[in-house]
């Protein structure tokens, strides 16, 4: 095991304690119109500890990962728990047992030097400007992120977890028929650092051609027709819907805070074609982009089957929320930075593939839309949501028509999922963003395309 892990001492026979050493490395380069405007490399290290004693949690963190000094965090966490106890007696919850021992680190190719990354970005910009007449601007981002955590608990866990992901964003910008700027963004993501991601100019050329084709279509886009519409949502959009609008209300801390899902276990919340899982570390025999073999409480990670054939079945949880709800632990408590406290968070949330072909799903729509890309959005614990749509097409008589201008979709995730009448047989994973919930979090989401009904905003 890593030498940076702080020692753990059991505070009392009636207490639970955990220590975490955490290293977070991030690299980000941004180029606008061939000019490098950002080249940032950051490293955060630290150790944190939590103690559960007398019905209260105590948390402490320090910026030093030296084992002797890190022990101070554990003692401070114990004292913080005692301070909290001054608010009055509280019944101690019997936290579920569970321990994990192991080490998991992704070891891929050699990393790319900063100069090589800059050269690749410059080549992509130059090629796009030379090949695509009328292109006004490019924005390119290349970044990677590496989390390495060593968790030790009084339950006997001693585990190293590593999450590494890399991202390349390509945005092409032009002007539409009204002289207004329009843009299309494509995101390429994968496991490991930028040296592991296939983003040479030669490999990206088909993707760049596709992005430019969408951009040309958006230059002549028309306004969407507002109201309830029959749509096909791309895998990316279905993944966002699963994560934002349905995943968060299935986080046990939000359930305890009053999320609508609390009273819906065992009841239909989606079409019987829909099964939705928060994957811990392995999907169909392959390790996912955000593998969580054990969480930051040392709890072994297991898949949480949130919806099974349309029926709401369970929630993602921490040790405490599992105890409060009387359900098995899922290993879903995670912290983003070294000085963050673990919260119930999603890992790799996805709707499972069905049996339909995407082409047949589109052909089955007489008058509706194909929704391909989403921008910012929001959702709440009632499953109500609103997402920006940044790329979409009309569907007329089962055939794709004109692109539509940027718009929004909104509604209840439960009602949208209940309207699903087709799920495609393909699967796409996306790990390009962050989840926000008091602190950011690295997550991935996935799914097939789904067909259903949603409210589309119009002019």
Image: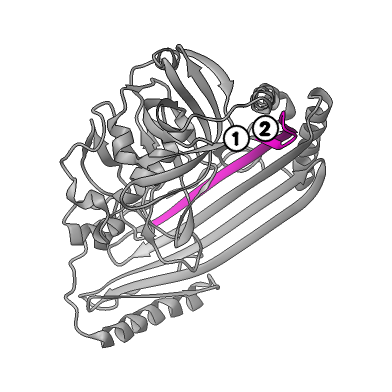
Magenta stretch, main secondary structure, is strand
Image position of 97 with respect to 453: above or below: below
Residue 162 position within the rendered picture, expressed as x and y whole percent measured from the top left: 49, 50
Number of labels in the image equals: 2
Q: Residue 188 carries which label?
A: 1
Q: Where is residue 66 in the image (x, y as percent from the top left)?
A: 53, 72
Per the image, label 1 sits on a secondary structure element best described as strand
Relative to 351, say whether 260 is above or below: below
Q: Which residue is drawn at 50% across and 35% down?
A: 458
> Magenta stretch containing residue 375, yes or no?
no
Measure the C-alpha gap from mark 2 to mark 1: 8 Å
Sequence-wise first label, 2 or 1: 1
Q: Locate residue 71, reporting x and y percent.
A: 44, 77
- Region of the chain picked out in magenta, as a range: 159-183
Residue 437 place in picture, x, y as percent: 43, 58
Residue 199: image tag: 2
**Residue 131: which disc?**
none
The answer to whether 338 is drawn above or below residue 115 in the figure is below
């Amino acid at each position: 095991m890593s030498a940076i892990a702080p020692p753990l001492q059991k505070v009392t026979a009636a207490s639970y304690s955990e220590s975490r050493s955490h290293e977070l490395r991030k690299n980000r380069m941004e180029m606008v119109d061939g000019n490098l405007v950002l080249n940032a490399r950051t490293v955060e290290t630290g150790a944190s500890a939590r103690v559960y004693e007398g019905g209260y949690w105590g948390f402490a963190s320090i910026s030093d990962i030296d084992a002797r000094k890190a022990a101070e965090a554990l003692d401070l966490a114990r004292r913080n728990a005692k301070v909290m106890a001054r608010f009055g007696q509280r019944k101690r919850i019997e936290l579920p047992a569970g321990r994990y021992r192991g080490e998991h680190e992704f070891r891929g190719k050699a990393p790319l030097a900063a100069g090589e990354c800059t050269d690749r970005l410059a080549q992509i910009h130059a090629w796009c400007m030379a090949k695509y007449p009328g292109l006004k601007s490019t924005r390119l981002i290349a970044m990677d992120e590496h989390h390495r955590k060593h968790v030790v608990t009084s339950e006997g866990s001693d585990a190293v977890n590593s999450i590494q992901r890399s991202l390349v964003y390509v945005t092409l910008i032009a002007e539409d028929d009204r002289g207004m700027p329009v843009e299309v963004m494509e995101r390429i993501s994968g496991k490991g650092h930028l040296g592991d991601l296939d983003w040479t100019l030669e490999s990206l050329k088909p993707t760049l051609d596709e992005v430019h084709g969408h951009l040309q279509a958006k230059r002549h886009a028309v306004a969407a027709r507002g109201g309830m519409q029959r749509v096909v949502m791309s895998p990316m959009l279905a993944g966002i819907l699963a994560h934002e609008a349905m995943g968060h209300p299935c986080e046990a801390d939000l359930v305890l805070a009053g999320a609508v899902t609390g009273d819906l276990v065992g009841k239909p919340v989606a079409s019987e074609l829909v099964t939705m899982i928060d994957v811990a570390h392995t999907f169909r025999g392959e390790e996912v982009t955000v593998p969580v073999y054990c969480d930051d409480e040392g709890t072994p990670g297991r898949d949480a089957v949130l919806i099974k054939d349309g029926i709401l079945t369970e929630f993602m949880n921490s040790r405490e929320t599992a105890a409060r709800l009387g359900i098995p632990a899922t290993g879903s408590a995670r912290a983003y930075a070294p000085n963050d406290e673990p919260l119930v968070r999603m890992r790799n949330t996805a709707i499972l593939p069905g049996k339909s072909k995407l082409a047949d799903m589109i052909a089955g729509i007489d008058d509706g839309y194909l929704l391909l890309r989403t921008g910012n959005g929001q959702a709440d614990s009632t499953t109500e949501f609103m997402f920006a749509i940044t790329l979409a097409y009309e569907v007329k008589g089962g055939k794709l028509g004109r692109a539509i201008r940027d718009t929004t979709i909104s509604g209840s995730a439960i009602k949208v999922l209940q309207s699903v009448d087709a799920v495609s047989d393909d699967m796409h994973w996306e790990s390009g963003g962050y989840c926000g919930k008091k602190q950011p979090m690295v997550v991935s989401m996935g799914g097939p395309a789904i067909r259903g009904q949603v409210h589309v905003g119009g002019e």
